[in-house]
Image (cartoon, helix red, strand yellow):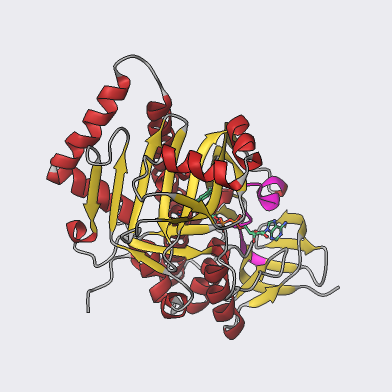
Amino acid sequence: MSSCRVEVVVVGGGAVGAALALALEQAGFAVVLVEAREPAAFDPDRVDPRVYALSPASLALLSRLGVRDALAGLRTSPYHRMQVWQDAPDRGLGFDAGLIGERELGWIVEDAALRQVLWDALRRSRVELRVPARVERFEPGTSDVRLVLDVGAPIRASLAVAADGADSPLRALAGLVVEQAPYGQSGVVTHVRTTRPHESTAWQRFTPAGPLAFLPLADGRSSIVWSVRDLLARELLRLPEADFAARVGAAFQHRLGAVEVSGERLAIPLRLQLARRWVGPRIALAGDAAHAVHPLAGQGLNLGFLDVGALVAILVEARDCGRADLGAPATLRAYERWRQGDAMIAARGFDLIDGLFRSDVPGLPWLRATGLALVDRLGSLKREFAWHAAGFAGRVPPLCARLAMP
Ligand SMILES: Cc1cc2nc3c(=O)[nH]c(=O)nc-3n(C[C@H](O)[C@H](O)[C@H](O)COP(=O)(O)OP(=O)(O)OC[C@H]3O[C@@H](n4cnc5c(N)ncnc54)[C@H](O)[C@@H]3O)c2cc1C
C-alpha cells in the first residue's frame, strides 16, 4: 500500500490535537490528523456535561485560529469574577477581570461546542483527516517516521505528535513512560439550578470532602465539579436527586441558595500523571498525553493549549532558520525545555493545594482560611495569582499572547 508523506502527523483530535493540527496548517505545514472517533456534534437541545473554564490565553489562541466567534455562538458563558473560600464565602479570595486588565476572566464552554468549531475549521482547511482511524505501529527512522493505521494507507512524516489523551496509545507505542499517581478521587460532574443567580462568577469552596466548583452556564444554571474520594463519589452517584442536591447545597454553604439537579451525573477518575520525557525519536507529546492534572484549578486544557502554542512556535522557528527536519532532536528538545517545567510546576502546585486543603492537621484549617484572606488583601500577590490563572505568566507562546483590547 502506498504511503502519504507530510511534515507533521497529529494523533488525537480532542481539543488539543484539533487546535494543533489547525494551527500548524495555518502556519503553512502539511498535516494529517488521525482520530479514533467521529467527534460528537454540538447538540442545541442538550448541554454537554463536560465543560471547561478557558483562560484568556486559550481564548487568544482560539481567536487567532479564527474559531472564537463561532464558539461564542454555542452557549458560551463568559465569567468575570472568581471567588474561592473555605469556611465562609466572605473570608476568601476573590478577584475580577479588571485586576488583570481583561474584560473577562474566561469562558465556560462545552466540550462538544469546542470540538465542533475546531472540526468545522479543520474540514474547511487543507488538513488531511483520517477518522475513524487508530495507529497500530510507530516506526521512527533517520529521515522520517512511518505510522501504520488500522485503516487506509500508512503515513510518513518528519514528526508525529501524540495528542491522544491521558492514556495515549501512541505514547505507549513510542515507549515514552509516565509517572502516575492516581488520586483515589473522582470529579463528580453535573448541572444544577440554583435559586440565586450565579453572577457570572466561577465559585469554588474547599469543602472537607474536596474542592467543589460551580461554573456559570449561559442558561443561568451552573456546572459543578466536586472532587471527592472514589467511595464518596460512588455514594453521591447513587443518591436520589433531591438528596444529592441537598448534599451539594450544604457543602456549598448555600452561597447561591437552594440547589436542584438538572442534568446527568458522571464521576470522572482523577490522576496526577506526568511524562518523564515529552519527546523521543520523531515524536512529541502534547495535552493530556504529556500531563494530567487535578481539576481544582480548571487548568488541564489551558495547559494543553499552551503546549500547542509552544510547539507551533518552535516548528515555525526551525523552518524559518532553515532547519528543515522538523523531527530533529534539538528542535524537539527546545519544545520540551519550554513546556515540561511549567506543566510540572503547575501539576505539583495543584497537587499541593489539594493535599493542603484536605489535611486536618490541627491548626491547618485556620491557617488555610487566614492564608486565603491574606492573599485577598495583598494586591500584588493576588494579581500574580490571577495572571497565572489567565495563562499570561512566564514565557507565553505568540499564539496565546494577550490580545489587544479593541
Ligand atoms: C472533572 C474535570 C474537569 C475539568 N475541567 C477543566 C477546566 O475547567 N479547564 C481546563 O482547562 N481543563 C479542565 N479539565 C482537563 C481537560 O478535560 C483535559 O485537560 C483535556 O480534555 C485534555 O484534552 P486532550 O485533547 O489532550 O485529550 P482528550 O480530550 O482526552 O482527547 C484525546 C483524543 O484522542 C483520541 N484518541 C484516543 N486514542 C486514540 C488513538 N489510538 N488513535 C487516534 N485517536 C485517539 C480520543 O478519541 C480523543 O478525541 C478537566 C478535567 C476533568 C477530569
Residue 132 visible to the viewer: yes
Seen from the viewer's position, the closer of residues 175 and 209 is 209
- Rendered residue at 55%/49% (across/down): 189
- Left or right relative to 320: residue 184: right
View extreme (right): residue: 1
Query: Where is residue 356 drawn, in percent x and y?
Result: 38, 27
- Rendered residue at 52%/68% (across/down): 19
Q: In which quadrant of this rendering is ligand 1 seen?
A: bottom right
User: How many marks on residues?
Assistant: 0
Query: Where is residue 294 drawn, in percent x and y?
Result: 48, 41
Question: Looking at the rendering, in which quadrant would you find the C terminus?
Answer: bottom left
Residue 286 visible to the viewer: no
Query: Where is residue 320 drawn, in percent x and y?
Result: 41, 72
- Left or right relative to 377: residue 94: right
Is residue 189 inside the magenta stretch? Answer: no
Seen from the viewer's position, the closer of residues 178 and 96 is 96
Seen from the viewer's position, the closer of residues 306 and 91 is 91
Question: Looking at the rendering, in which quadrant would you find the N terminus?
Answer: bottom right
- Rendered residue at 54%/73% (across/down): 118
Is residue 169 inside the magenta stretch? Answer: yes
View extreme (bottom): residue: 124
Extent of the magenta region: 157-172
Seen from the viewer's position, the closer of residues 258 and 112 is 258
Relative to 390, is 274 above or below? above
Q: Residue 7 falls in which quadrant of the image?
A: bottom right
- Left or right relative to 342: residue 243: right
Query: Where is residue 330 drawn, in percent x and y?
Result: 48, 53
Relative to 305, is 381 above or below? above
